[in-house]
């Protein structure tokens, strides 16, 4: 988060991305594994970077961006809802597409800022 803020990514955009990631976690039933820290469990992972969400680092099983999604298994011992998530307006693929659009914009902003960062690092190396 600190690095993204240093590169000029607005807090509001990061917050929107955070909410999309959390919603994806819920729609993929990552929260049903029984872990009390289910939303943070993947933060330290370093493999398969292309398949991971930006902030939570969760591996969604496919390359991001993608237009397909493997729905997760629900291990929660809860009573079934009267209507499914899709009937109630929840759609993991829709949330993923919104996430991808926001993620692409952030990546483009970071890429645009990198030349400035490199020049600043070169300049800073000349300081006494």
Image (cartoon, rainbow, N blue to C red):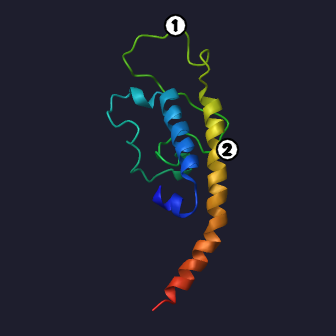
Tell me the SS state at disc 2: helix
Tell me the residue at 44%/54% (across/down). 46
Badge 1, how many Cα within 10 Å: few under 14, some, many 20+?
few
| Whether residue 65 is visible | no
Cα separation between marks 1 and 2: 32 Å
Please name the residue that numbered disc 2 is placed on: 101
Q: Position of residue 18 (x, y in %)?
A: 51, 42
Q: Is residue 109 above or below residue 90?
A: below
Q: Position of residue 76 (x, y in %)?
A: 38, 20
| Whether residue 102 is visible | yes
In this rendering, position of residue 51 left or right of residue 39: right
Q: Position of residue 54 (x, y in %)?
A: 52, 49
Tell me the SS state at disc 1: loop
Please name the residue that numbered disc 1 is placed on: 82
Q: Is residue 33 above or below residue 37?
A: above
Tell me the residue at 66%/37% (across/down). 97
Residue placed furthest toward the top: 82
Tell me the residue at 46%/10% (across/down). 80
Badge 2, how many Cα within 10 Å: few under 14, some, many 20+?
few
């Amino acid at each position: 988060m600190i690095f993204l803020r240093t590169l000029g990514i607005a807090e509001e955009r990061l917050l929107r991305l955070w909410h999309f990631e959390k919603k994806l976690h819920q729609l993929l039933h990552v929260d049903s594994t029984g872990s009390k820290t289910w939303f943070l469990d993947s933060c330290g992972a370093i493999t398969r970077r292309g398949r991971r969400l930006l902030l939570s680092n969760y591996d969604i099983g496919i390359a991001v961006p993608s237009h397909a999604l493997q729905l997760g298994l629900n291990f929660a011992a809860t009573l079934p809802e009267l209507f499914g998530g899709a009937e109630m307006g929840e759609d993991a693929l829709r949330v993923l597409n919104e996430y991808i659009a926001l993620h692409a914009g952030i990546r483009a902003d970071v890429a645009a800022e990198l030349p400035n960062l490199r020049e600043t690092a070169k300049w800073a190396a000349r300081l006494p």
